[in-house]
Amino acid sequence: MSGERHPIRGALPEPGPDHPAIALRTILDDQGAVADPALVPSLAADEWLRIYRGMLTIRTMDERLFGMQRQGRIGFYGEARGQEAAVIGSVAALDEQDWVLPALREAGAAIYRGLPLRSYVAQIFGNADDPGLGHQLPCHPGTRASRYVTMSSCIATQLPHAVGVAWAARISGDRAVALGYMGDGATSEADFHVALNFAGVHRLPVVFFCQNNQWAISTPANAQTASKTIAVKALAYGIPGVRVDGNDVLAVYAATREAVDRARAGEGPTLIEALTYRIGAHSSSDDPSRYRDERVTEQWKERDPIARFRLWLLARKHLTEEADRDLRETLDGEVREAIAAEEPVGPPPLRTLVEQVYAEVPPALAEQLAEIEPLPRQKLGGIHQ
């Protein structure tokens, strides 16, 4: 009838508390203990130690490079402190032929897959050794050799790209899987819908990995979605959603490996939500104390993913206290050496501003370049202007 209002009788029934998209999958508790050893992924000791090294590399880089930004030696930095298990636990589940489509906090995944530390530091400085010749914001590395695609600062845009990579793998008969990272804020973007919908319809070999660190810059997760979890959003697209403790590297690895194996077997995509917390600022341009209760941050520091994994490694005798100290000293030395080698390197040639864009530089740009090339170039700390 015209004008008749039909009341909503209630929301659709939600999955139960034990559903994988609702329950938080955990293997390793906050004290580094495992309740059910049968759940521990079957990896050799050296593989677990490589994962631990990858996590410590992120922590070491972040502590050193974030401090350098505060000293004015680099222009920008975005750290992954507190999220190391989510980054390395997920990327470690990939095979060599797989692709990584990162968001802001996955640089450690690039290094884990083979990006030389000096190349990453050069990218931070934007110097002449930077493969991108300083034409990209810091913390935006890329490595074709390791199949790690340079990220875009526009959130969620990498998700359709991940679907495109998976689609190309399907067409070419390649058995590669694409791993597309995102933060919780990206799930509010249209690209998230486009990517999951298309991948679900065509059952593409892609894994969507959300690092839910509970803050999209200054927007808390509960202010941007009414969904009970982020993983549950997957069900609307006809694909599995899995929620995992993002500070538990064992659980992250296990969930990602299952999703990767499923994708490679032709069973389609999976959305993984890794619940973690952004211990630091969104970036060096941010002050989180202005919008969040830092007492909560202190509580999450007690759930440090490196500390709990270290306890498990020690208990399993994969690691000793002495070996741990040696590893930390080695990593600190490697980061310091990379910085010492790259900080004095000069800026890329000015001509690359146009020559890397045009095969034949337009006359108007060539004229402008000729005018500014003779001008002196200033240097402020490690930042060339």
Image (tube, grey):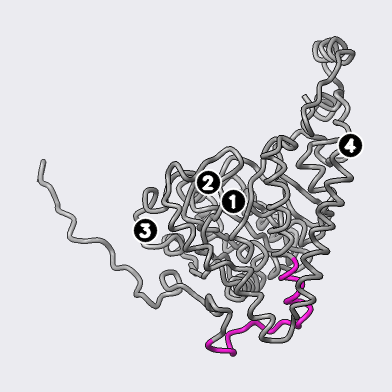
Q: Magenta stretch containing residue 50, yes or no?
A: yes
Q: The disc labelled 1 sits on which kind of residue?
A: Leu
User: Badge 1: few (under 14), some or many (20 or more) residues near its Cα, within 10 Å?
Assistant: many
Residue 114 horizontal side relative to residue 220, left or right: right
Question: Which mark is drawn over residue 159?
Answer: 1
- Spatial CA span between label 1 and label 2: 7 Å
Q: Which of the pair 94/342 is nearer the observer?
A: 342
Q: The disc labelled 3 sits on which kind of residue?
A: Ser
Label 3 sits on residue: 227
Q: Earlier in the sequence, mark 4 or mark 2?
A: 2
Q: Which of the pair 213/340 is nearer the observer?
A: 340
Q: Given this view, does label 3 or label 1 mark the residue nearer the observer?
A: 3
Asked if the residues shown at circle 3 and circle 4 are in contact, with their CB atoms under 8 angstroms apart, the answer is no
Label 4 sits on residue: 345
How far across and how far down the image is residue 361, in percent?
A: 85, 20
Question: Which mark is drawn over residue 73?
Answer: none
